[in-house]
Image (cartoon, rainbow, N blue to C red):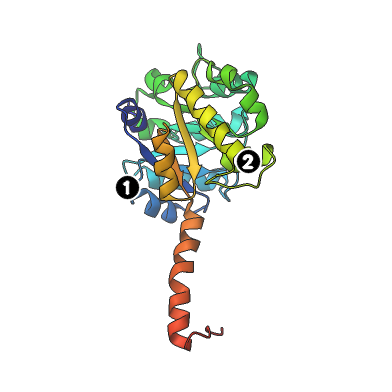
Amino acid sequence: MRENRLRQLWDAGEKTVNAWLGIPNSFSAEIMAQQGFESVTIDMQHGLVDYPASIGMLQAISTTDAVPLVRVPWNEPGIIMKSLDAGAYGIICPMINSKAEAEAFVSSVRYPPLGSRSFGPIRATMYAGADYYKHANNTVLTLAMIETTDAMAALEDILAVPGLDGIYVGPADLSISMGHAPRMDQEDQPVVDAIQKIIDTTKRHKKYAGIHCGSVSYIKKMWGIGFDYATLLSDARMLAMKAGELLPELQAKSSGGKGVGY
C-alpha cells in the first residue's frame, strides 16, 4: 500500500503546509496540487464541492505527491466512508465536541475490528494499492476538528480516543464559540490561550495537530508553538487576493488613477 507521506513527515518532526479547495473543479485542484503542498484538502463542508465533484478533484490531486484529504460535511458515516472509498488518505471531521462523537468518527474510518467501516474501496485500491484493506487502518488519518467551547471542555477525553490520529483547529468557529469575532489569525488573548491549550494537550497525548491560517507569518508562529501542519488560506481566497493585488495597479495606470469603467 502507498505510504501516507504526512505520517512519515510528521513522525520525523517535519512541518507541512496544507492546501484548501472549495472550488468544485478538477483543473483548479490539479493546479493547487502541482504547487508543492504536502497535502491538499477538499472542503465538502463550507466549500462548494459535492461528492461527484470531489471524485475528479481526488483524481487530479493523485497526479502529484500531495496527500489527498477531505473535510466531510459532518460526522456522518455515509459520506466519510464514500470519501475514503474514493481515495481520501485522511478525513478532517468538523464539530467534534465529545468523546462519543470522536469514537463515532474513528469507527466510521476504521475497518472491523477497530471500527465499523464497510468494505468497498472502489477507487482507493487504484490509488493506494491492491493490499489497501490490509493496511488502511494504520495508514488513513483521522483528524477531529476542535472548534467549540464544548470541545475544549472535552479535550482530554477526545484526545484519549484510540484510533484518533490528531486534531485540526477551526479558529473561526472557536472564536465565535468563545464570544469573539471569527478570524483565522486570531490575536484575541482568550482565543490565543485556548489554541495554546489545544496544542499543549494534543502533544501530551502524542498526536498530530493542525490549524487553518490566513498568512505565512501566522503559520510560522503556529509551527513555533508546536503545530505539525497548517493550512494557508484556500483556493478561492488566493485567487481573489492575487486578482485584488494586480488589478488595481492596472486600473490606476490605464486611467490616471481614476479607475476603469466597465
Whether residue 72 can be seen here: no
- Label 2, secondary structure: give it: helix
> In front: mark 1 or mark 2?
2
Image quadrant assignment for residue 224: top left
Using the numbered discs, state the Cα–Cα distance from disc 1 to disc 2 in whole angstroms.
Answer: 30 Å
Q: Which residue is mark 1?
A: 36
Mark 2: amino acid: Ser
- The answer to whether 141 appears left or right of 107 in the picture is left
1 or 2: tag closer to the N-terminus: 1
Mark 1: amino acid: Gly
- Which residue is the extreme one toward the right? 179
- The answer to whether 253 appears left or right of 94 in the picture is left
Image quadrant assignment for residue 98: top right
- Which residue is the extreme one toward the top? 113
- Which residue is the extreme one toward the front? 189
**Residue 184 pos. (x, y %):** 54, 46
Q: Answer above or below: position of 232 versus 177.
A: below
Viewer-closest of 94 and 108: 94
Whether residue 53 can be seen here: yes
**Residue 227 pos. (x, y %):** 43, 33
- Label 1, secondary structure: give it: loop
**Residue 248 pos. (x, y %):** 48, 75
Q: Answer above or below: position of 43 versus 137.
A: below
Q: Quadrant of the C terminus?
A: bottom right
**What's the residue at 32%, 47% (across, down)?**
36
Q: Give neighbour class at mark 1: few <14, some 14-19, many 20+ (Cα, 10 Å).
A: some
Mark carried by residue 243: none
**Residue 76 pos. (x, y %):** 63, 30
**What's the residue at 60%, 30% (across, down)?**
78
Q: Which residue is mark 2?
A: 175
